[in-house]
Image (cartoon, rainbow, N blue to C red):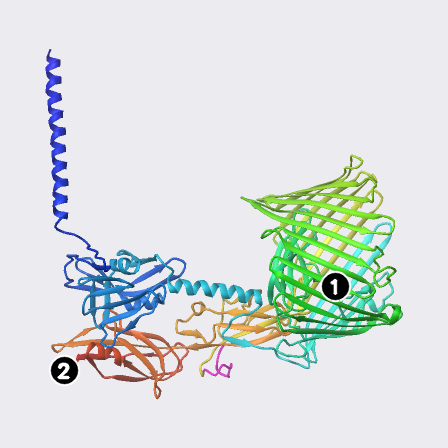
Amino acid sequence: MLKDKYCVVYSRFMRLIVMSSFSFVAKILFLLVFLSSFTPYEKKSESNFVIDKSTDPDPVSYDLFPVNVIIDGVGSFDLDVLYTDSNLLYINIEDLFRALKIPCTTGLKGIDLDGFIGNEQQSYSIDFAKGLVKVGERTFSAPNKLLKESGSLYMESSYFAKAFGITLDFNYRSLTIKLKADFELPIVKQIRLEKIRSNISKVKGEIVADTLISRDYHLFKFGTLDWSASSFQNWKGGTNNAFGLSLGTELLYGEANISVNYFDRYKFDNRQLQYQWRWIDNDKTFIKQAQVGKISVSTISFINAPLVGASIRNSPTTVRKAQGSYVIDEITEANWTVELYINNVLVDFTTADASGSFTFKVPIVYGFTTVKLRYYGPTGEERTEEREMNVPYTVVAPNEFEYGLSAGVVQDGDGSLFGKWDFNYGVNRILTVGGGVEYLSSLANNGLIPFAKATVQPFSKLILNGEYAHGVRTKGLLNYYITKDILLELDYAKYAEGQKVTLFNASEEREAKLSMPFHYKKVNGYFRLDYSQLVYDTFNYNYSNLMFSASYKQFNANASTQINWVSEKDPFITNDLVLGYRFRNNYVIRSSARYNATDSALISFSTELEKRIAKGYFSASLQRNLQSNDFYLNVGCKYDFSFARATVSGSQSKLNSGTSISARGSLAFGGGNGYIHSNNNSSVGKGGILLYPFLDLNNNGILDKGEHMVKLTTARISGGRAIFNEKDSIVRIPNLNSFTSYLIEFNDNDLDNIAWRFKHKTYKVLVDPNQFKRIDVPILSMGEISGMAYMEKENELKGIGRILIKIYEKNSDKVVAETLSEYDGYIYKLGLKPGEYRACVDLEQLSNLNFIAEPSCRYFTIKASEEGDIVDGIDFILKKNKE
């Protein structure tokens, strides 16, 4: 019973609590509704007139200090702000808009601003006298949001979001403002467009710099040397030795290279001697390139011997990208890096997979083009040979005409004469036509081969090429991108009956290729299908290859199937599988197998283990051939010294054994102060740059007597590596491609003295062949000034901020620098060259403020000094103009 009574009391108590709480909440809600009916925040009429009835109190006092404004993707800048005692932040409108590149113009009386925001149709105006802000068709009343102080116009930070869509998030502790906008700011658009133009310039081979260094020409200048030596010992067949020597010079204003290769088991002949003179000047009009010596020419007729002669062309060696691309797929060593050069300019690089396969998406460029591949091993080894590829398309810019003329003697033992003239003309953006004539004296019918060709590109994804060589062949090539990356290539050639110009004895050749790269999460790879058919009088020969390559993290795999068949006979099918894995401790293991699918038999298998070190590798491989019942075991190592690359290996098969040793290196002379640059790669045909940074006290750009060099630790160069020597201050940049422009950049922050400045920040340097090119890099020692801007009130001086000081040359009205006084009146400016100047308070600001300055200008001199001259006492006193 006591329990029931307790329950009743408890129930009544809880009901009272709940009802009291409900009543309290209801009263609060009623009070809020009642008050809101008397304090509307905005009232919008049909005329889009917006009235702000904020009751914020007028600011009584404030602090003036700088803050850092941060914009994602742009960077940051400093801005002076006012912070009131009521915790309101006021932003200088002119300074903010000018930093954001938003047009902003001040009225005649300095109390109104106007311009446009977002686009020219979205104009704005700010009238401080009336307290109105108008943006487009909307008008805001902001009596407590606008402030004028010391001639500068300020607006409360939250009002920027309401009127202009610019949000300012202020952090008082870090004194930073994060700025965001609901439209693309002009500064963001400018940076975006600059990046686009920069990318286009890089693709076109154009480099923007403030200083251009052109070619230096010499009658003769010796500079580079390559050497090589190798020996192979066959334990059952004797020893083979080979030696090579190449010299690189500048001769008669052009690049001259000569090399000789000697094999002790063969009689020396002129094929072991290579020599060539090359001249390039892309600024010329009629002849931009010339070669003399053993030249390389793309020919229709088959020539199996060196060609000694000369050639000239009017096409430049720069890379000017046109629309479209084509694919190169080749085979090299597993995991080797391959570089693609167009007109001796590096445009791309890739890494071969576990089977050595690699592909390039080659951009089509305007004009005559040479394409080369250069190979590098996983640990830095470089193959000396450079493969020159046949370019299937020639595209010339509209209304441009290019020609080439070559002639020489073929070293075939008969002294056959060769000559070729070709031209290309850009009819319009879609069509390029060309033709010419080729001559070879050893051919029948006078040896003349007239030819014509055309390239049609109706749109970027499709390109067609046709060629007709009289009495030899008719050829067509189609290149079509089905999607962005899936490429279909169709190639067809029909040969004239009985032609002896080429070694090709089939009547027709048909090829089709489909390549498709793919990317899925962390898996990258590509798929390729090739088919070719050779048509003879009595049978057809067919070949097809299906390849799939993929990589995932450290794992790499390549699988391919080759099918060969003749007419209706049964096909012969082989499968290849290569697997590779790279361990984190620099071990690499690769295994491969070849399988005869026709006979259901394993042909061969192999395993290779490689250990990579900092400057080389050790490797061991075993290959087993089941068909010949033989094996091949190889153990080798390679090491890169600074001056040479050395390799040693030993091999063992079922019937024979052998060892080999080789070394190669190069020297580049003329590196300054007797320095000779040694390298384990080739130096012949390349050039270098010598940078002489010095303190230019008399500002004449020349390293004079009494001026000393400055030691640098940083220099950025596109496509090169700078070497800093502890023994001197010369910066050496070796191994650069001749006749190619490189961009060198400097940063003032890398200098040891804060008063020092680079006279030029960026250099575009055209590299001279087979030599180091000297460039003086002047560094200026700048001066600084300091002082105060005071405001005189009731015979008392107080520092005043945001006073604009303009600095002129002494007897000129040219403004060389300007600065604003700090919030406490402090004036400071660094970066003035030695000379005579005058500093003046800005007359327009004085007029807007109705102030006068005493004195109106101060004259001073910056003296030449290694540490930078310092001038203080640049003081100004501002007073109210009583007139």
x then y, percent, for residue 507: 83, 55
Residue 823 sits in quarter: bottom left
Kindly report the distance in space between the C-alpha atoms of the residues bearing marks 1 and 2.
89 Å
Q: Quadrant of the C terminus?
A: bottom left
x then y, percent, for residue 576: 72, 42
Discs 1/2, front? 1
Given the image, on which type of amino acid does mark 2 rest? Lys
Q: Is residue 303 above or below residue 521?
A: below
Q: Under tag 2, what secondary structure?
A: loop
Predominant SS of the magenta segment: loop
Give the left or right position of residue 488, taking residue 42 as reference: right
**Is residue 673 among the parts visible in the rendering?**
no
- Residue behind mark 1: 467
x then y, percent, for residue 779: 46, 76
Residue 116 sits in quarter: bottom left
Count numbered badges in the picture.
2
Name the outermost residue toward the top: 1
Give the left or right position of residue 874, taking residue 54 as reference: right
Tell me where the magenta segment starts and ends, as one range.
Answer: 699-708
- Residue behind mark 2: 882
Q: Quadrant of the N terminus?
A: top left
x then y, percent, for residue 538: 87, 49
Q: Is residue 1 above or below residue 329?
A: above
Given the image, on which type of amino acid does mark 1 rest? Glu
Q: Are marks 1 and 2 in contact (CB under 8 Å)?
A: no
Q: Is residue 581 magenta?
A: no
Which one is nearer the viewer's eye here, 292 or 98?
A: 98
Mark sitting earlier along the chain (1/2): 1
